[in-house]
Image: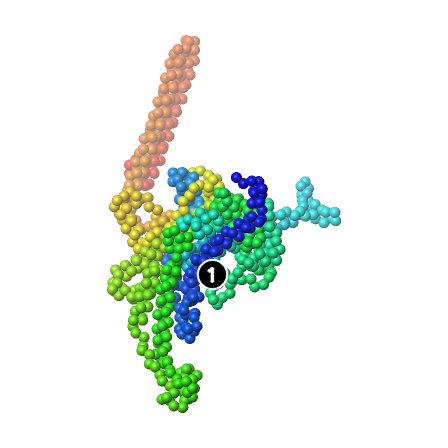
Amino acid sequence: MQSDEQKQTDSGENYWLQRARQIYSNSSDFLDADIRRQVEKNLAHFNNEHARDSKFNSPNYRNRNRLFHPKSRQGVTNNEAAFAAAMFSTADLVSVSAGDDGDPRQQASAEINQELLNYRLAHSIPWFLTSVGAYQAAQVYGIVASYNYWRYEEKAYVERVPLVDAYTRQPVLDDQGQPAYQEIEHAEVLHDKPCVDLIPFENLRFDPAADWRDPISTSPYVIREVPMFACDVLARMGSEDSKTGRQDWKNYTIEQLISASQEDNSNDATRKAREGEKRNDSTEVTDYGDYTIIWLRENFVRIQGEEFVYWTVGDMLLLSDPEPLEDVYLHGMRPITLGICNLEAFKNYPKSPVELASGLQERVNSVINQRADNVDLVLNKRYYIRRGAKIDTAALVRNTPGGGVMMDDIIKEIRTESTPDVTSSSYAEQDRLDVLMDEAAGAFSQASVQNNRALNETVGGMELMNGSASAVSEYRIRTFVETWVEPTLRQLVQLEQKYETDETIMALCARKAGMYQKYGENLPLDQLLEAELTVRVNVGIGATNPQQKLDRMITGFGALGQIAPNYLVRVKPEEVVNEIFGAVGYKDGQRFFMNEQEFAEFQEQNAPPPDPEFEIKRMELEQKGQKIAQEGQKLQFDMQFALQELNQIAQLKREELQYKRTDKAEDLQRKALIEERRIQTTRDIAAGRNLNDQTRIQLQAQNLSQGNDTF
């Protein structure tokens, strides 16, 4: 256990600056000693330039051919095209599933988060440029890292509102008789979205002894170097956190920032190699002022199992106090993901595809330039001139067509040397080197076809070569997806769960997901977004070859139809359409098909004319149906009338029985009333029969008008 004095010392600025200085020095020593030189060589080959230690940069090759054959760049470009075809063939890139398929809440959360993530990738994040750029960096450097965060910025402004009396609703006047105003503070949201920023290779440091399968999480520290304009740093110093109310960064002058940043802003060799020999460093300090680049470091440090994060200017100034990681990043994770495309066990910095082919690239350049030198010597012969001879040497070296060379004795003063022409072995050597480089890069090019005559003469042979190249390319794509794409998207989902506040976007995605109709309950969105989810990317083996992709899908459905045909009725037609049309080059195939309403209108408009015989039979059946209905109506009337008569007679009988039980004194009066009642009942029955006869006559007339001769 630490004493109180030790804890107080550890919380001071010197302690945190010393720790930042130490971890940066340890990681830089390893990077500079073992990794940086090869990375600079890879960048040179990617930029179609000879490496710094290449023989073509020596004085002996000053006047010789120094061409660079861009095989490394071609291989990277081919792999980028395959990656783009695999990643962006369908409209929905991401598939988010529930951790528990049986929980309706998690299913609803998965659908909403999938719609949110697809919306953000399409509208908020330049995902195509970011993902393809990340894959390019992984092929050149061997690793690629990104900083995944939520960007929220707001701008405060004051609105002047005239004061109005609450009772009279009249404007309030000030002491001078002018309308009085009230100032109301508002905040305009400028940015509220997730971001994925790629980190240049030289701006990320972690411990070289970290686990090679997850270096970012297992390293005791991670350092992210960030170049920022001085004006932006000063603006953040004066701002406050909208949630905590405390000041973001400590106050320093611009002179202090520049002085502390100069030591860290040395001319980084890797950065210069990336920009190229003919370009200046884009982050190099040219003059002092608000637009001077200040180099900051965000330090993620694990101390006794607890994660802290703080900012420094180089290793000289403490820019922010250390805070627990979960207080700064609500999901509680280091907001950095690292990926690779070439797997090498137990190595945190695996070799990149460009590095694997670097020796072949140098050999290709050597063969091409030697052949070019040979051609130059054949066309422009080498001369031996006697020392001290009186001869126009400059004119001889220029060898201008139609020109002349002045000399005293043409036989004694000069002698030529004939150089044999270049042989076919030189071209054969280059062809084989091209094939080897294509195999190393996992690319399928025209050189591969031309140099495999035994295979390229048949379609099957072409498919074998293409399949072999595609297997390597797909393996690297799958490795990159597993190590960078999916972890990055998982962090984006967690950012959506913790930071998403745009109610319009959430409502739009919830309605698009249709979770209210499917699950039948109005669940709060903030609870749904918190569910445990699994993120998968729709990229598999065979994704780089559209024909193979379609063939495998057809084979899979065919096998399913034979083994479990009942499952075919559960197929999602929309997903199948998107996958098929995505394989043939269309991002969304739904636009080629009508929706249900359009299809119903189309069927109604394009319905075929009815058959005449069918129409006659239909009319006959309708007439028979009407006749049956009329007969049923007649029976119903008769039954109602008979029932009414029976009810009246029964009522009369009940009254007669009741009258018989009375005294004789009332007998005559009762009989008179009964007789009157009998007469009235007889009249009612007659009237009812008359009405029934009239209804029968009307129905018969209607039937005759429709062509029926019977009722």
Q: How many marks?
A: 1
| Residue 287 place in picture, x, y as percent | 58, 63
Determine whether 165 is above or below 277 in the image: above
Scheme by which the image is coloured? rainbow
Q: Does residue 41 show up?
A: yes
Between 352 and 173, the one lying in front of the other is: 352
- What is the quadrant of residue 676 in the picture? top left
Q: Is residue 335 left or right of residue 412?
A: right
Q: Secondary structure at mark 1?
A: helix
**Location of residue 365 with respect to 236 vertically, above or below:** below
**Residue occupying image coordinates x 46% and y 56%:** 31
Q: What percent of the width, then of the height, locates residue 246?
A: 59, 46
Task: Give coordinates of residue 527: x percent, y percent.
Answer: 47, 40
Residue located at (33% from left, 37% from top): 701
* Residue at the farthest right position: 176
Res 674 → quadrant? top left
List the residue tagged with mark 1.
Answer: 270
Q: Is residue 231 visible?
A: no
Q: Could you tell me the amino acid type at mark 1?
A: Thr
Percent position (x, y) of residue 433? 33, 65
For label 1, the crowd category at 10 Å Cα-Cα, with few meaning under 14, some 14 to 19 and many 20 or more, is many
Query: From this viewpoint, which residue is outermost toward the bottom?
Result: 408
Q: Quadrant of the C terminus?
A: top left
